[in-house]
Structures are given as structure tokens and as C-alpha cells.
Image (tube, rainbow, N blue to C red):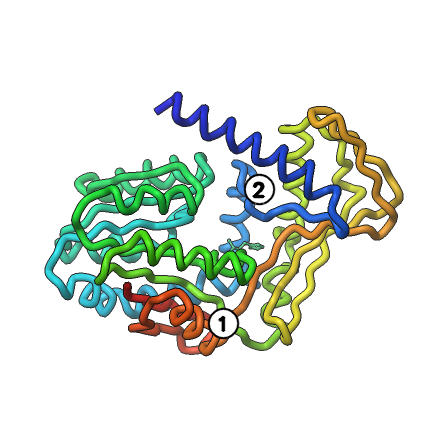
Amino acid sequence: MDDVETTIRDSDADALAEEVRTGLQKTPKALSSRFFYDAEGSRIFAEIMRSPEYYLTRSEYDVLDTYKADLLRLITSDNRPFELVELGAGDGLKTKILLGFFDSQRADFTYAPVDISADALEGLVVDVRKQWPDLPLNPRHDDYFSALEHLSSETDSRKVVLFLGSNIGNFAPDEAIAFYQQLHDRLKPGDIVLTGFDLQKNPAVIHAAYNDRQGLTRAFNLNLLRRINRDLEADFDLAAFDHYETYSPETGEARSYLVSQKTQIIDIRALGMRVPFQEGEIIHTEISRKFNRSQIEHLAQQTGFSLTSWFSDDKGYFADVIFTR
Ligand code: AVI
């Protein structure tokens, strides 16, 4: 396990180096939000999920809590044991509702959480073992795409893939399609994907969720520069960058940026690179897409799935949707 961990951390470091090398030479400059989740980033994200403005987690929690029995009925409709594969499990706060309920109903299943943050995954495994010592666990420290490669090689049980939290919103539209096509290829007929989609709503509500008053999203975004300083020996001065968020109700995209507060040159020693910034110049760091029902139906249709169930909260803020292979 230690060797595997080291290999993953090395390939993470290589991927970050490549992202910074290419992303900071683009116009406009861009870095992927995939690199937000070091230990500190995961810790800040956990705080964001508890903040008053970040309605996504509470809304999805409500949906799963309200419909957990319906979900179990659907999942076990073929009387087979199932493998609950969770992509991007994080701290598993919402999944624990399902785990607790499924366990109380003596459902026959294995929980297989996958996360790119080793720290988040370790925390989750310790927690789940403590709360449900008899629950079969099969954790994987990996990114989503490589985790999918392993899906088909495993057991014969029904696969139930959880992709919660509107993580799908962090993909560009073409990546989202490629992702579900890949899922479709890896899964067998009757397997299920349960995806959490943040829905389009009053733009002010969405904008506030990414521009919280405590400054958590700001710290989350700036932490990417701290990580680059540490991992790639760079000298970003965090005080010389600001967080800026936009939400366009026309495209349904919330976008995060880091904005240089002055003209400056950043030295990235591990890459032998010096990167100039103009005052006001941006680095685009994240897309968080919001969906409407027809876009979700279209996604299922385009990638060969059938949309078989739709569960949403009272306010209509968030939907957990079942695609069946
Ligand atoms: C993980 N992901 C769904 C979050 C989102 O809402 O896009 C990450 C996040 N970024 C800023 N706040 C939360």
C-alpha cells in the first residue's frame, strides 16, 4: 500500500507540474480545479460545505435523507448484492445517510469509495470502519477516470455508481459527455449511476454560494497558489492575488478566478519558469456548471443511458438522478 501511495503522490506531482507549465502559458492563464484538493484544500472544502451560503450540500442531504428507502428499493429490485462505488467520496457526509440506512436494512453490499485526495479518503475509511465495523470496504485512491478502468474487472454484483455533490458541474461539457460514455462502456446492463446535479435557480443564490461572507471560497481558491509554492518551489505572494467569481444565468456556469493585484513576476523554481502577470490579469481556476432538466435528459440520451428516476428537494435546488445502463 505504501508503494502504491508513493506512486500516486508522484504522479500527482507530475500532473501538477504539467498543469502549471502549460496552464500559465495559456491566454488567459488557467489551472484545473482538480488540484484544489491537497490536505488543506480538502479541509477548507469541508468548511465550505457547512457554510450558510453553500446550499448544495444541505439540499442534497435532504434529498438523500427523504428518498433513501426509495433508492434502496430501486437498487435492490433485482435481488442481487451490489457494489456501491462512490466517485469523489470526500468526507462522505451525505453517503453516510445511505450507508447507515442500507446497513440498518441489512442490505448485502460493499462500499467502494474513490477519491483523489489521500487525506480525505483515509479519514473516510477510518470513520466508516468505526461506525459500521462489519461493512465490507474497498477504498481506492485514484482519479475518476482511472477508477473507471477497474470497474469492469471486479465482481459480478450490480454496480451502483454514486457521483454526488454536483462534482459533474466541475467538468467542461465535452468532458461530462466523455465521462458518461466511459461509464456506459464499463458498466453492464442493469447497473446504475446516481448523480447529484445542482440545478439552475435564482442567480443571486448561486453567486453567493461561491462568494461566501466568511471568505472560505476565497481561501479555497488561493490555496492552489500555496500548493504550487510548496510543491513546485514557487514564490506566489497570496496577498497579491484576489478571488473573483462570476455566475452567468445564460450559460449556467459559475466561474472562479484568481486576479493579480499588481504587475509582478512569479518564479517557479522546480519548473525553471518565470511567469509575468499584469495588474488585473486572471487565472481561471474552476467551472461549476448548473443544470436544467432538459440538459440532464439530453446527457443521458447522448451517452446511451435511460433516465429512470429523478429525486429533488422541496425548493427544487438540487436533483439526484438515476441513469440506468
Ligand atoms: C466539488 N465541487 C462540486 C464544488 C463546486 O461547488 O463546484 C467545489 C467548490 N468550489 C467552490 N466551492 C465549492
Ligand 1 is in which quadrant of the figure? Answer: bottom right
Q: Report which residue position mark 1 lands on.
A: 199
> Mark 2 is on which residue type?
Phe
Left or right: residue 53 compared with residue 311 = right
Residue located 62% across and 35% down the image: 18
Residue located 51% across and 56% down the image: 175
Cα gap from disc 2 to disc 1, whole angstroms: 25 Å
Residue located 63% across and 65% down the image: 208
Instruction: Specify which label sits upstream in the sequence, 2 or 1.
Output: 2
Q: Report which residue position mark 2 lands on.
A: 35
Query: Dot 2, crowdedness within 10 Å: few (<14), some or many (≥20)?
Result: many
> Mark 1 is on which residue type?
Leu
**Residue that lies at the very extreme toward the top in this rendered image:** 3
Query: Dot 1, crowdedness within 10 Å: few (<14), some or many (≥20)?
Result: many
For label 2, the SS is: helix
Which quarter of the figure has residue 187? bottom left
Q: Is residue 138 above or below residue 166?
A: above
Q: Nearest the camera: 100 or 136?
A: 136
The quarter of the picture where the N terminus appears is: top left
Q: Is residue 175 above or below residue 73?
A: above
For label 1, the SS is: loop
Residue 42, position in %: x, y?
51, 43
The quarter of the picture where the C terminus appears is: bottom left
Residue 53, position in %: x, y?
57, 63
Residue located 45% across and 24% down the image: 6
Left or right: residue 148 compared with residue 272 = left
